[in-house]
Amino acid sequence: MSARTALQRLLKGSVTPAANDSRFLLDVHSRAIPGRERMRRYRDDDEVDLVIVGAGAGGSVLAQRLARRGWRIVILEAGPFWDPDEDWVSDEAGSRHLYWTEPRVIGGEHPVALGKNNSGRGVGGSMVHYAGYAPRFHPSDFETRTRDGVGADWPISYEELKPHYEEVERELPVAGQNWPWGDPHAYPQSPHPVTGAAARLWQGAKRCGIEMRVGPVAIVNGTFGNRPHCIYRGYCLQGCKVNAKGSPYVSHLPDAIEHGVEVRANCMALRVEIEEGSGRATGVTYATEADGRHHLQRARAVAVAGYSIETPRLLLNSTSRRFPNGLGNNSDLVGRYVMVQGASQTAGRFPEELRSYKAPPPEVSSEQFYETDESRGFARGFSIQTVAPLPIGWAEHVLADGHWGRAMREYMRDYNHWAVIGVLNELLPHPENRVTLADEKDRYGQPVARFDYTLTDNDKRNMEFSTDVITEILHAAEAQDVLTIQRFAHLIGGARMGRSPEEGVVNEDQRIWETPNVYVTDGSACPTQGSANPALTIMAMSSRLAERLAGGAAR
Amino acid sequence: MARDLRRPDHLPKRRPDGQPPHPSWLPRQRRGITPQMIGRYPDYDVFDAEPTWDEQTRRVVKERLYARGPLRFFASDEEPALRAFCDTATAQDAEPRVPVAEMVDRKLANGWLDGYRYHDMPSDEETWRIVLSGLDHTAQERHSRPFAELEAPAREEIVGSLAAGKLSGGPWEELNVGRAWSVCMRAILEAFYSHPWAWNEIGFGGPAYPRGFMRLGQGAEVLEPFETPGATDEDPVRAAAELER
């Protein structure tokens, strides 16, 4: 154990972020970000220092960091500014408004369902409804081309992100056991208690010789400033009404607003404006949802953080004489190399009632299969995580195994006896897996995104192998029946970093090549995805970018 | 013959015919309402915990109890096929029914999209209309009657073909049949399992804010004070007497 890890362990439960007061700015008795009525407002023709598109994981962290350095910032967010007390509910079907459900088209041989599983809308972004798993990427993720001959090497290394991972883990904060995989590390908060359902799965894994650990989840374990302890309600995917689960809404936006950031909600960005002569961005044209009227927010720099579908869409829609095929798309790379993770889940039936709807769905996970093992017959790997669907999610699981009508009702009535475990496969980047513009237009007359996706043979072998592993875990746990669903999760890529304009849309500072002042600060900048949930990495990258911008290195 | 809920013998995949047993082994609901008044938790009613729910969630959940017609999205000549299809897909053959048809109608009438459309498929709205006319087309072809007028086994056979993506001719040529099934089932399952009567049937704890859950163990240790354990239709007095013997 390094001295640093030993120190962190000693301090567990008392390690808090140095330059972020969000936890104290929230109210003990209500959930909304206080002080919205006092929030700084800018006029469209004020030339702010930075306009950010998207108030999610990427945009919020960048805003919070730079606001503390005195930058004048406006965030444009397509969706609403939530008041969790009023707008969120303890209910699956009642949470549809948290997702990006505007029209989109999907294609390819293996089309990826969008909407509730992987797309957020509103202040806080999709982290409002993510499960809460917050693992780091492994050092190997940054050089898969060199190590394994697949994917791509990043222009930055794990070491460059590491201090930002640590800082964001303190801010969310992340709870979990000491982590033995990738770059071994400790977490600022202790692991949560484990439910009977997760304990059964863990036992099965142990019998298969598979190591699992509790966490890492961005869920408060203890009080954290004015944020209360988790109440084990089980509705993480419906927006945490408790303020216990970390998301930019509670972890970064309160501090950002306190430092003068304006979060302008219900404003859909339509186009990044480029000055023909210099190639500089001058601001972002957006439409207000209420009246559809167009506005131009002037800014000295622009950061796009709309995630892997909307960021490419915005860039492709931002045509100019200098960029006739879309902003930053002169090498035809915008929208390419979009990745998803394979996310098969298997459910096992046990004699006792487990009632897995209690407690956060993310509990115990393993990264033992994360790296390449040639004996498995494919490159790269997968992670294993316990999950816990609520009734509608469970019904989709039962249907996917081929049961409807009377058979479905029977499996559904058996809900309380089941425990579910899933995988996240690292599926490889491919240029033809891409976002393009469809013929269809949205309510603002803007062409909608089309996302085509097709698996490679390596992807299929990885998914098949990992599904067998979790099925073995269930058998080892003595499950009496098994139901399986094949699915996808998460989005990454679409405007990736590269060492040259031929290799990526943005450079190592996430700046679009050929522009002096447009940045991409969300998951679309990632060249690979590992088999880790992406939220923490997106935040850490924004934290790093903020440091580069503040230090002037990126200009 | 009483069944032991610890055993999985009632589960379709564990049975030779792949189908569940006749629901007569299930207890009649004694408390609250379940679809068809059967379920595994005869003494459980999710509304017993209602005083612990937050106001916003209570409003959203209770509104579902009052989902009524007239239908706004579907035309009156589509209604019989819609109801027959929703009933068959969710095995609702008697009152009380979760009003799946009304809830699907509301979703489509309100334009509540799911966030994606397959490139080779029409809009979800159009898909629903084509599926309903396709069901009637196949019913006429196989039995010379509209879908809604068929007996349950004949309807189940046609819906089985739809689920397998194996319907063709007439309206079915206008879309990818397997994907149409998934579009429809997304809406049907969301409707059925968002209804508190279905929660009673499956013993789901329901809304949990601001109260939360406290008992995270297994077996008897996982029950909150307002939750009751699963049961079968066996007579508890006779079962106890048998144990004594």
Image (cartoon, coloured by chain):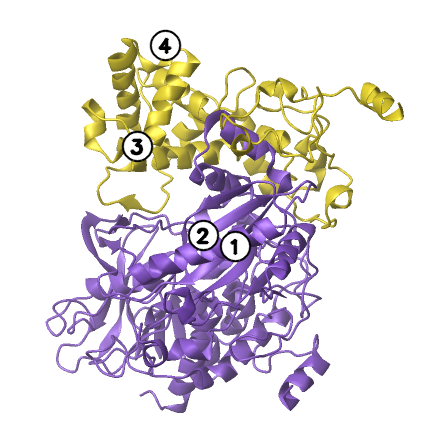
Q: Residue at x 47, y 36 (%)?
A: B190
The residue tagged 3 is B165
1 or 4: mark nearer the eye: 1
> Can you say whether A542 is above or below A459 in the image?
below
The colour assigned to chain A within the rendered structure: purple
Q: Are marks 1 and 4 on the same chain?
A: no
Q: Residue at x 68, y 21 (%)?
A: B27
Q: Is residue A411 visible?
A: yes
| Marks 3 and 4, how far apart at CA | 23 Å
3 or 4: mark nearer the eye: 3
What element does badge 1 sit on? helix
Q: Residue at x 42, y 68 (%)?
A: A375
Earlier-in-chain disc, 3 versus 4 = 4
Res B149 label: 4
Residue contact between numbered discs 1 and 4, judged by CB atoms under 8 Å: no
Chain letter belonging to callout 1: A
Which chain has been coloured yellow in this picture? B
Task: Check disc 2 and give the amino acid type.
Answer: Ser
The residue tagged 2 is A344
**Residue A508 % position (x, y):** 32, 83
Chain letter belonging to callout 2: A
| Marks 3 and 2, how far apart at CA | 22 Å
Chain letter belonging to callout 3: B
Task: Check disc 1 and give the amino acid type.
Answer: Ile
Task: Check disc 3 and give the amino acid type.
Answer: Gly
2 or 4: mark nearer the eye: 2
- Quarter of the figure with residue B202: top right
- Quarter of the figure with residue A529: bottom left
